[in-house]
Image: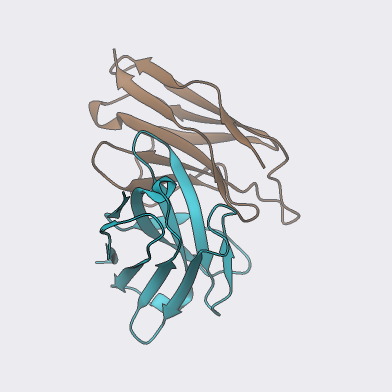
Chain colours: A cyan, B brown
Amino acid sequence: EEQLVESGGDLVQPGGSLRLSCAASGFTFSNYWMHWVRRAPGKGLVWVARINSDGSTNYADSVKGRFTLSRDNAKNTVHLQMHSLTVEDTAVYYCARDEDDQEYYYGMDVWGPGTTVTVS
Amino acid sequence: IVMTQSAFSVPVTLGEPASISCRSSQSLLYSNGYTYVDWYLQKPGQPPQLLIYLGSNRASGVPDRFSGSGSGTDFTLKISRVEAEDVGVYYCMEALQTPFIFGPGTKVDIK
């Protein structure tokens, strides 16, 4: 079964740091770009960041300079390192995959159940 | 890019059709001829799930009562006959360029 599982969510004080992880299984991890999307309480979905197969990254303006996305293809894992957290970062964080295909796009078709980050 | 959805909430009747509209501030048509808009559904207590990609392609396992249409800047998700399991918040999302932008969401619930 193709699966993503997030971990690392916790309660953290403003200004603190946290590292989220997303473990993949059941598919060839290195063939996929990986995204993080968050949903704050009472709010809608917000795209956070993406890491391509080659490790290049893109970030939402709201997290640029504070969040760093990395991947370990040998361990089928991505990590989202978050610094200088504010109450506005409180959310459920989801990872999702996106197939690396230069000719086509298939959407973010597998999602993890999410991990909760509370900044307070 | 700014994504807007026409309604915050859409009450629907079981067995009846429903549609949700989405608009982008700029064309999502890429030079390869594909339109880079997705539709996602987040059911209560669940992660989002992909319904439609590239504007009109149903994701694997998505019932054929869901369809996506539109071009350029105006898009529609249609449910031919609403079922109870379709309740949740529907989001369009542009995938043309990062940062990807979600619409604000449209909540679908049963009348």
| Quarter holding residue A95 | bottom left
Residue B77 in picture, x, y percent from top left: 49, 31
The answer to whether residue A22 is above or below residue B51 is below
The answer to whether residue B61 is above or below residue B20 is below
What residue sits 24% from the left and 26% below the top? B84
Q: Nearer the viewer, residue B87 or A101?
A: B87
Residue B4 in picture, x, y percent from top left: 58, 30
What residue sits 56% from the left and 59% below the top? A105
The answer to whether residue A114 is above or below residue B105 is below
Is residue B96 toward the left or the right of residue B87 in the image? right
| Image quarter hosting the N terminus of chain A | bottom left
| Quarter holding residue A108 | bottom left
Viewer can see residue B81: no
Residue A120 in picture, x, y percent from top left: 31, 49
Q: Nearer the viewer, residue B61 or A118?
A: A118
Is residue A35 toward the left or the right of residue A58 in the image? left
What residue sits 47% from the left and 70% below the top? A69
Total count of labels:
0
Residue B20 in picture, x, y percent from top left: 49, 25
